[in-house]
Amino acid sequence: MELLVTYDVDTTTPDGRRRLRRVAKICEAYGIRVQKSVFEIVCTDADWLTMRHRLLEIIAHEHDSIRVYSLQRGTFAKAEHLGHSPPAAHNEPLIY
């Protein structure tokens, strides 16, 4: 499954800035950051359910927004990159 995840977390408070870092860390655990608040994620259905549950526990539903686009397999490989945007290596292992 290929997912494009974008988020907008209210950072006007210290709690909001903490939520932003936590949302980013969860997304980094599953995918590749392609822009500041945009991740390309290749995962299984089970991974997505776990990730979704973790995100729902963190965000402030009245202030924050996460949008998830489910894409056809192979969409990331066909993406056109304009400007300074090197292609993300989705088929290579993530090494931390």
Image (cartoon, helix red, strand yellow):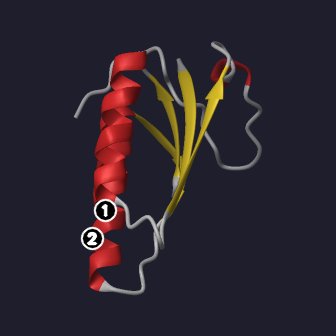
Is any atom of residue 28 visible in this view?
no
Residue at figure coordinates x 49%, y 21% from the top left: 90
Residue at figure coordinates x 42%, y 17% from the top left: 45
Q: Amino acid at mark 1?
A: Arg
Mark 1, other Cα within 10 Å: few <14 / some 14–19 / many ≥20: few
Image-based side of 44 in relation to 83, left or right: left
Residue at figure coordinates x 38%, y 43% from the top left: 27
The image shows residue 36, relative to residue 72, as above or below, that is below
Q: Nearer the viewer, residue 49 or 92?
A: 49
Q: Nearer the viewer, residue 42 or 47?
A: 47
In the image, residue 36 lies at what x, y percent? 51, 58
Secondary structure at badge 1 equals helix
- Disc 1 + disc 2, Cβ < 8 Å: yes
In the image, residue 81 lies at what x, y percent? 73, 38
Residue at figure coordinates x 45%, y 36% from the top left: 32
Which disc, if any, is residue 50? none
Which disc, if any, is residue 21? 1
Spot the residue most to the left. 96
Image-based side of 29 in relation to 37, left or right: left
Q: Which residue is mark 2?
A: 18
